[in-house]
Amino acid sequence: MFSHLVEKQHIADLFVIDSAGTGGWHAGHPPDTRSVAVANRHGIDISGQKARQVRAVDFVNFDLIFAMDEDNLDRLRASCPVQYKHKVHLFSQYATGRRESVPDPYYGGEDGFEAVYSMLLDGCISALEKLETGQDS
């Protein structure tokens, strides 16, 4: 979604964007078909994505690493070398200033996927505005 936003603004070359999970159980798998459907309805094609697990080198290579919920934030911080801990944030708190988890819609209906899409879109727009205005500290 963030990739889509920066592509629309013609600034994609300023960012290296990736997605990874703290667990490896979905590694190599495509997104849930309901996620693909919701993204498609909003003009975003995520069908070619494949899940991967966070790697130690990610803490070196990326300036910002976002967790969607507190459990994953704790896992990321536990595996992150101390000199890179400043890069790891709860997505909602970084993006909007509200400390709230983005729920996992997997066990719910399609409306849960739409709600998560809306949360992520709002957060991505806010995060991009922060980055563009230099308020990312």
Image (tube, rainbow, N blue to C red):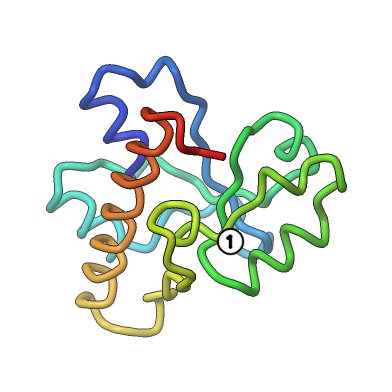
The percent coordinates of residue 130 (x first, y second) are 40, 38
Q: Residue at x 26, y 17 (%)?
A: 10
Quadrant where the C terminus lies? top right
Is residue 58 shown left or right of residue 43?
A: right
Tag 1: residue type?
His
User: Dividing the picture into quarters, in which one does residue 56 lie?
Assistant: top right
Is residue 93 shown left or right of residue 79?
A: left
Is residue 125 shown left or right of residue 62?
A: left
Structural crowding at the residue carrying mark 1, measured as other residues with C-alpha within 10 Å and reported as few (<14), some (14–19) or many (≥20): some
User: Dividing the picture into quarters, in which one does residue 46 lie?
Assistant: top left
Quadrant where the N terminus lies? top left
The percent coordinates of residue 36 (x first, y second) are 28, 55
Q: In the image, is residue 86 above or below residue 106? A: above
Residue, disc 1: 26
Q: Residue at x 50, y 38 (%)?
A: 136
Q: Residue at x 14, y 49 (%)?
A: 42
Q: In the image, is residue 41 above or below residue 64? A: below
Q: In the image, is residue 4 above or below residue 24? A: above
The percent coordinates of residue 60 (x first, y second) are 76, 32
Front residue of this view, candidates 74 and 114: 74
Is residue 60 shown left or right of residue 18?
A: right
Mark count? 1
Q: Residue furthest right?
A: 82
Q: In the image, is residue 135 above or below residue 95? A: above
> Does dot 1 land on a helix, a strand or a loop?
loop
Front residue of this view, candidates 124 and 108: 124
Q: Residue at x 51, y 26 (%)?
A: 16
Front residue of this view, candidates 84 and 68: 84
